[in-house]
Image: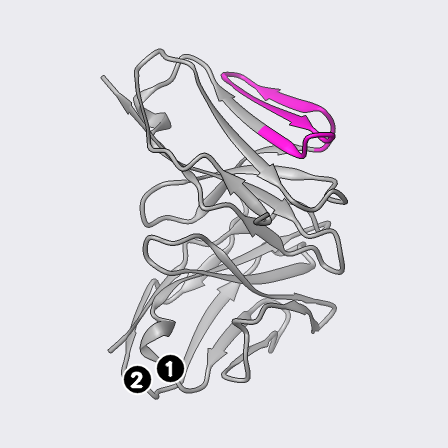
Amino acid sequence: EPEVTQTPSHQVTQMGQEVILRCVPISNHLYFYWYRQILGQKVEFLVSFYNNEISEKSEIFDDQFSVERPDGSNFTLKIRSTKLEDSAMYFCASSSQNTEAFFGQGTRLTVV
Amino acid sequence: RKEVEQDPGPFNVPEGATVAFNCTYSNSASQSFFWYRQDCRKEPKLLMSVYSSGNEDGRFTAQLNRASQYISLLIRDSKLSDSATYLCVVPIPSGNTPLVFGKGTRLSVIA
């Protein structure tokens, strides 16, 4: 069964450092998303990406965040200068027709 | 009114019980709705999609009431393996419809 894969599964970084979270969406999907979930809280939308550009983004997705699809398969989320409050589980998701989305296993980001 | 609101839970039920979760949404233009299941520290996994009045899949039944902007999930004959957090999810009906998640309802099925 096709699935969304994310790497790394866990990333520990020092405050102020840049991190890149990687995702390989399901191969025939066209819509890609990043969500985050702070421990004990609900899943929050960050950004959606379609046709090689950002289509929607939330207030959380400020200038410190960026996304890229550098080749035909990877979809990355970069956080330029991490803050303690960026510590969360980051989920990548993809969908084929802009309906239900399928999620990767997540990257647990810990900023120290 | 918050975009997606769910019963706060937790629900603690014995094996074999029937349990129902409720969810209300604020945007009357929403057309599709989803229930996801999330195990502790895992990713959300799609459980059911609801596009019309309802959907049934084995022990799980989802119902939609558009007039009341209300969705429910019914689980019959609960199993221990049903223990998880159930997330009500509603796409924002604009642009590339990012999903809006409810806070989830925690279910514990006990032997």
Of labels 2 and 1, earlier in sequence is 2
- Horizontal relation, residue A11 to residue B2: left or right: left
Q: Nearer the viewer, residue A19 or A1?
A: A19
Q: How is the image coloured?
A: one colour
Q: CA distance from mark 2 to mark 1?
A: 5 Å
- The residue carrying mark 2 is A15
- Subunit that carries the residue with mark 2: A
Q: Secondary structure at mark 2?
A: loop
Residue B91: x %, y % from top left: 66, 49
Q: Does the magenta segment cover residue B49?
A: no
Amino acid under disc 2: Met
- The residue carrying mark 1 is A82
Residue A40: x %, y % from top left: 33, 53
For the residues labelled 2 and 1, say whether their Cβ atoms are less than 8 Å apart. Answer: yes
Q: Residue at x 33, y 26 (%)?
A: B81
Q: Does the magenta segment cover residue B56?
A: yes
